[in-house]
């Protein structure tokens, strides 16, 4: 049996915990170490208790890198560039890493994402950009099932994707100056990426379809209202009367097939105001004579909890991520880490790094997703379609920071 591949986590928050759960289902890999400002001891204890690995807490990034085969960066957006810089510095000083993972988004701006790509190239180490929805088994199964149909009838021409829930847990997510924006930066990156993936003809590279235009809108529909703004301020310390971010974003990315010239559309809709059972991932695709549909709230398991019994589970998130209800008829997903693609993206990263190559999604790809998100912000601000074939637009995107990310969201949202 091969020696287990030793992963190290930088960060021990919500996503790190979810990834640790997913790692239980990955063969020949373990969580060997963690380095974080808070939560490291708890994550290490969880790993040991659940058999994910004999996880040790390391005092700094250099020590972690010296005791792991690869590291995964699961830190907040506003410190990601510095943390990756520290990982690259450790590599230059002798850490024998086989790979570096970065959670989405790669950067808060195109300039930041390009700098992270440069750092990865400077280190000379394979990379993985973690975008879990492309790795979802339901998405891959749908495309596999339709592969012969696409060859006979032609590729998908419209894919619509959404990720919605009631809002993030951590205060920094709500702060556009630290997070890089609002729900568009946080979740539209998922929807844009999975649309691009689904619209790609069978057996073509992940970036085969060329993005040619973006049109988008952003809005503050719930969390700018006085009653909810007050709740948000009390819970997170972020004042949406002063520095608001969008809680709703929608738009269309137009892609063109470079071989046939055919243009297709990827529509995204994302919100932090989805007050239903919890997180919902929805996606459908339409082609000539065929279609598919995915909805993560459809489950073979449902639980009913009456009012009389609800106090026993008040404020629990047992049924679903970002659950907003603990009573009534609740869909339950017994294995969210696998459903959302975390297991498969970890398997891909581990197998790729073992083979000495980049993962399916590289940091260069992550940079392109950042660019599409920033083009969406630019479109919403200017109320016009952004032409991605214009070299001047490409230059401008390299130095663009949205008004929302600058803390000037009131100019475009209120």
Image (cartoon, grey):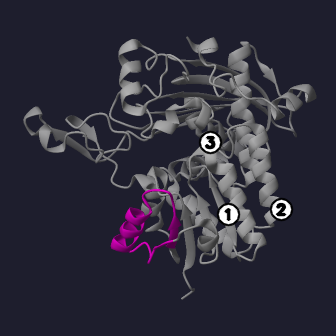
Of residue 198 and residue 336, the one placed in the foreground of this image is: 336
The disc placed on residue 100 is 1
Q: Secondary structure at mark 1?
A: strand
Horizontal and vertical percent for residue 190? 59, 40
Q: Quadrant of residue 160?
A: top right
Q: Marks 2 and 1, how far apart in space?
A: 12 Å
Disc 3, SS = helix
Q: Earlier in the sequence, mark 2 or mark 3?
A: 2
From which residue to which does the magenta span run? 31-57
Q: Position of residue 112 (x, y in %)?
A: 75, 43
Asked whether the residues under the numbered discs 2 and 1 touch, taking CB atoms below 8 Å apart as contact, a structural biologist would say: no
Q: Assess disc 1: are there few (<14), some (14-19) or many (≥20) residues with their C-alpha within 10 Å of its C-alpha.
A: many
Q: Point out the frontmost of discs 2 and 3.
A: 2
Seen in the picture, residue 92 relative to 256 is either above or below; the reply is below
Front of the two marks 1 and 3: 1
In the rendered structure, the answer to whether residue 234 lies left or right of residue 287 reads: left
The residue lying at 15 percent from left, 39 percent from top is: 305
Residue 201, compared with residue 289, is above or below; it is below
Disc 2 from disc 3: Cα separation = 29 Å
Q: Is residue 159 left or right of residue 151?
A: left
Can you name the residue that lies furthest to the bottom here?
1
Name the residue beneath numbered marker 2. 122
Residue linked to disc 3: 194
The residue positioned 91% from the left and 26% from the top of the image is: 392
Question: Residues under labels 1 and 3: Cα distance?
Answer: 22 Å
Query: Where does the image place residue 284, in percent across and percent down from the top left?
Result: 55, 34
Helix, strand, or loop for circle 2? helix
Sequence order check: which comes first, mark 1 or mark 3? 1
């Amino acid at each position: 049996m091969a020696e287990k591949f030793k992963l190290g986590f930088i960060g021990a928050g919500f996503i790190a915990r979810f990834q640790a759960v997913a790692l239980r289902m990955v063969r020949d890999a373990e969580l060997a170490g963690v380095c974080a400002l808070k939560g490291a001891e708890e994550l290490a204890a969880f790993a040991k208790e659940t058999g994910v690995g004999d996880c040790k807490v390391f005092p700094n990034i250099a020590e972690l890198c010296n005791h792991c085969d690869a590291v995964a960066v699961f830190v907040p957006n506003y410190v990601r560039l510095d943390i990756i810089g520290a990982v690259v510095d450790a590599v230059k000083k002798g850490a024998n890493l086989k790979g570096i993972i970065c959670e989405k988004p790669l950067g808060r701006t195109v300039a930041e994402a390009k700098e992270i790509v440069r750092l990865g190239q400077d280190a000379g180490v394979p990379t993985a950009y973690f975008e879990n929805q492309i790795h979802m088994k339901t998405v891959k199964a749908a495309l596999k099932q339709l592969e012969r149909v696409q060859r006979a009838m032609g590729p998908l021409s419209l894919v619509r994707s959404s990720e919605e829930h009631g809002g993030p847990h951590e205060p920094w997510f709500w702060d556009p100056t630290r997070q890089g924006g609002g729900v568009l930066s946080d979740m539209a990156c998922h929807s844009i990426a999975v649309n691009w993936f689904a619209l790609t003809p069978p057996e073509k590279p992940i970036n085969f379809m060329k993005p040619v235009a973006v049109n988008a809108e952003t809005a503050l529909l719930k969390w700018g209202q006085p009653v909810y703004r007050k709740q948000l301020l009390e819970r997170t310390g972020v004042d949406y009367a002063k520095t608001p971010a969008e809680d709703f974003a929608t738009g269309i990315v137009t892609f063109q097939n470079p071989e046939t010239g055919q243009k297709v559309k990827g529509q995204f809709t994302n919100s932090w105001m989805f007050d239903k059972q919890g997180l919902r991932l929805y996606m459908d695709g339409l082609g000539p004579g065929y279609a598919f549909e995915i909805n993560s709230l459809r489950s073979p398991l449902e639980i009913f909890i009456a009012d009389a019994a609800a106090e026993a589970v008040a404020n629990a998130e047992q049924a679903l991520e970002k659950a907003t209800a603990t009573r009534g008829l609740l869909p339950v997903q017994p294995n969210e880490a696998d459903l959302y693609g975390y297991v498969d993206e970890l398997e891909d990263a581990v197998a790729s790094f073992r083979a000495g190559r980049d993962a399916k999604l590289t940091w260069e790809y992550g940079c392109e997703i950042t660019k599409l998100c920033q083009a969406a912000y630019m479109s919403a601000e200017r109320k016009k379609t952004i032409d991605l074939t214009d070299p001047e637009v490409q230059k401008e995107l390299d130095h663009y920071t949205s008004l929302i990310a600058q803390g000037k969201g009131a100019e475009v949202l209120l």
